[in-house]
Image (cartoon, rainbow, N blue to C red):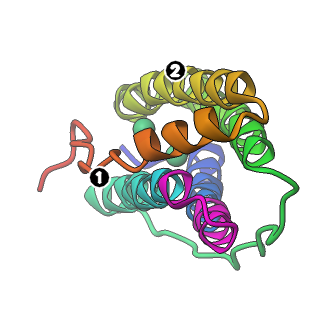
Amino acid sequence: MKMTEKVRNLINEQINKEYFSAFLYLSMSDWLNQQEWPGAANWMYVQYKEEIVHAEGFVRYMAMRGEKIELKPIEEPKHEWNSVLETFEEALAHEKYITAAIEKVAKAAEEDGDRAAKLFLDWYVLEQVEEEVNGEDNVMLWKKAGDHPGALFSLDRQYAARTFVADEIPHLDN
Ligand SMILES: [Fe+2]
Ligand SMILES: [Fe+2]
């Protein structure tokens, strides 16, 4: 079954949004490194790699369906923030925006009777639940550390421990 134009366009837009997410996290990671928060910078860098996997998941899905991808310019991300807490607050706000975008694609797939696309998108719907929970935790933890140097230092050390494990996105054929 060919994709409807609406679903194809929305998935193409989502590819762009996932690559933009990667850019945003990479920019945050770089700023955090500059500000000497190596742990938080590591966390954002791991997130950058996750976003590439999310984008590639859609790219591979389109190839599997024999649909053409359309790569559009990626928006320039912000380069500066006022605090480490602010980067995590913006990351959370960004994930909420991504959740809404994914829901929109899933809804279009449902409405257009594309059950295969809907099934594929379900993984992303659940992934967004995880992203928002992590995002809420991050904001809560950095808020709690407040401006206590000791608490901030140990929290940053904790964030240094995050390692990248590529998500296995279901329903892709290789
Ligand atoms: Fe993502
Ligand atoms: Fe994730």
Question: Which quarter holds ligand 2?
Answer: top left
User: Which of the pair 96/141 is nearer the observer?
Assistant: 141
- Residue in the image at 21% along x and 38% along y: 171
User: Could you tell me residue 20's position as x and y percent?
Assistant: 65, 63
Instruction: Using the image, determine if residue 173 lies above or below residue 60.
Output: above
Query: Which residue matches tag 2?
Result: 129
Give coordinates of residue 23: x percent, y percent: 62, 68
Crowding at dot 2, Cα within 10 Å, few <14 / some 14-19 / many 20+, comes out as some
Give how far across and how far down residue 68 sits, in percent.
46, 69
Q: Which is closer to the viewer, label 1 or label 2?
A: 1
Secondary structure at badge 1 equals loop
Q: What segment carries the magenta color?
A: 24-41
Q: Report which residue position mark 1 lands on.
A: 164
- Whether residue 27 appears in magenta in the rendering, the answer is yes
54 left or right of 105 in image:
left
Q: Is residue 142 left or right of residue 81?
A: left
Residue pictured at 47% horizontal, 24% vertical: 130
User: In this rendering, is residue 100 above or below 164?
Assistant: above
